[in-house]
Amino acid sequence: MFIIGATPNSDVVRIQAALNRFYRPKDVQIGGEFVGLSVHLDLFFKVSVPIAYGTVKLDLASLTDATEMQLQRLRGNSKEEVEFFKAVCDVLDIGACLAPWNGFKKPDGEAGKYFDMAAFHNQAAAATALGAYDLRGSVQSALICSELAVKSALLVSGESEDFLRNEIGHDLTKSIVHLDKTGNYDIKLISEALQKLPHFVRSRYEERAWTRIQVRDVLISAQSVLAEVARGFSKKSIWKEINGS
């Protein structure tokens, strides 16, 4: 709550004090455009895409909830640091299409609906990983995210929903040859990410104990697929823009 005025009003002060006692900070926080995650070791970090207007300067570390000591450890290992901040940029690429930011866009029509739903399930996967003790739900959300992302890309390339149901189904590896024809995507990245995902249907019923590292790999792989689809739509990459490549 923000009150504009030169002189504090006693009634307003009393009401604000009561609200501050009742509400937690997270209950009244202002949301951003999109939330995803980055990872380091077996730790999950919230990444928030801010609401932005005009020209902005992005400090990637400030978009995460990593502590200063965690960031210092990352700076001591360039490979891990790059992986961490590439995941941050993946989240930004997705959120930039949803906002949209300048030059970023999501597809129109049914493909856009699939992309929206993929982003929704990516947020669900991140939220579960960030807040739950049993992380199996995050794996299921991540799998749905990856499937919807790939199918969104296939719809953009001209395939029909009947094709998605009858030819692709839940076996996303069948999509690679069709996505490769468009020339819009990093097929190696998508293919390697899909190989890290468990079987879409069997994983629902397996009584499997997932380690945090295993969950990390699934969530980051699914998110990277959605991010690559976002980059294919927009022909833009925040990571490349930041690094001048």
Image (cartoon, helix red, strand yellow):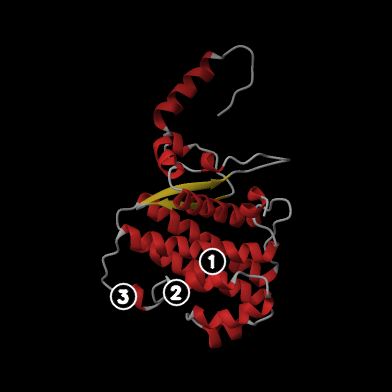
Q: Residues within 10 Å of mark 1 (few under 14, many from 20)?
A: many
**Front in this rendered view, residue 85 or 98:** 85
Local SS, label 1: helix
Looking at the picture, does residue 119 appear above or below residue 194? above
Q: Residue furthest bottom?
A: 166
Are discs 3 and 2 less than 8 Å apart at CB?
Answer: no
Disc nearer the start of the sequence (3/2): 2
Q: Residue at coordinates 39% horizontally, 73% vertically from top-left?
A: 198
The residue at 26%/71% (across/down) is: 207
Q: Earlier in the sequence, mark 2 or mark 1?
A: 2
Marker disc for residue 225: 1
Closer to us: 166 or 224: 224
Residue at the far top: name it: 7
Q: From the top left corner, tell me how far across and down residue 231 is, in percent.
A: 64, 62
Q: CA distance from mark 2 to mark 1?
A: 11 Å
- Looking at the image, is mark 2 or mark 1 nearer the viewer? 2
In the rendering, which numbered label is found on residue 205? 3
Circle 2 sits on which residue? 195
Residue at point 67% right, 71% down? 184
Establish if 40 lies above or below 198: above
How far across and how far down the image is residue 164, in percent? 57, 82
How dense is the environment of label 2, judged by Cα within 10 Å: few (below 14), some, or many (20 and up)?
few
